[in-house]
Amino acid sequence: MLKRRAMSVQAIEINNLYQRLDSLHHDEHLYLLVDVLSWPEGLAQAQSLDPQVNMVKLFMGTQLSNVMDVSPWVIEINDQSKTLLEQVAEKKIGIVYISTLSLSNFQQSITPLLIASMPAINDKQPHQVLLSFYRPSVAQGIALMNIGLLSFGACIEIWIPAARHQQWQSYTCHQTLPARAILLTPELHQSIDEQYYQYWLGGFGNWQSHSDEDFTKAARIVYLLKQNHVTRELPILMWLDWLQWHIQEIDIETILPIIRQDKPALARLEQVKLLVKDSGDE
């Protein structure tokens, strides 16, 4: 089980993040939590849930002085001669977790930082960027921003809650329905059909409007990514969990060769009773 080191500012989000991080197998990595608003009450809540957390936090906002009372939780990354992700790589941080309340804060503070830092990523070390937004309406704007990062081989997982704050407690982990987008290297981008890729970037903001065919396309993307060895960034188990809420039947043949090598995914397939169309061995 992955040691739970990454924290969020909302209890429901902490639980969601934990369950997904547990499937990533980044056992030796720390996680960088970038909180634009620097919520001290969020840190206090996180500490009460897991006092053993070893969290790396980069404060992008103007409220740094307000959280210095929790300084043991903070490992500052402030070497001006190096980019953010150069320092992340040195500290062996596998997850960059960005939490913000508004799209404007992300555009102004985080996007330029990521663009400047992405080339520093060591391709031998897995890196994943988790973006958490508290307003579901920003999904389309995020998709547009992602287009500007296509030349960098990083994985970004965008979390869009399915309900506003007062309703979160009534939603389970699966029902929060996070959206996802993968930023690809130019070579990998060429191997994926353009319509799939555009769907991947922009489709999840309004998931209720999509058809079974759309989700078959999503499954096809998973297969293509796996074929191109983008395995550490995109655990297929996450996708099986996510897809079950939308379709009863998908064209699973495209991803079955990959799933066969993943026993947890096979077990998940049986559990959610997806129809496996397989003409070969079970």
Image (spheres, rainbow, N blue to C red):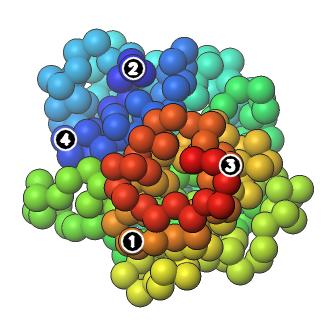
Q: Is residue 186 left or right of residue 86?
A: right
* Residue that badge 4 annotates: 11
Q: Which residue is mark 2?
A: 1
Rate crowding at label 3 as few (under 14), some (14 to 19) or many (20 or more) other CA atoms within 10 Å. some
State the residue at coordinates (25%, 39%).
15
Mark 3 highlights which residue?
257
**Of discs 2 and 3, which sits in the foreground?**
3
Report how far apart the C-alphas of labels 4 and 3 lie in the structure: 37 Å
Q: Can you give x and y, in whole percent of width and height, for residue 262 in the image?
A: 57, 37
Give the side of residue 117 with respect to residue 8, left or right: right
Q: Earlier in the sequence, mark 2 or mark 4?
A: 2
Q: Quadrant of the N terminus?
A: top left
Q: Earlier in the sequence, mark 1 or mark 4?
A: 4
Tell me the CA gap for discs 1 and 4. 31 Å
User: Label 1 is placed on what type of residue?
Assistant: Gln
Residue position for label 1: 248
Q: Is residue 98 above or below residue 40?
A: below
Q: Tell me whether the residue at label 1 lies in contact with that at label 3, contact meaning CB atoms closer than 8 angstroms.
A: no
Alpha carbon distance from label 2 to label 4 = 20 Å
Q: Mark 4 near mark 3, Cβ–Cβ under 8 Å?
A: no
Whichever of labels 4 and 3 marks the residue nearer the N terminus, that label is 4
The quarter holding residue 232 reads: top right
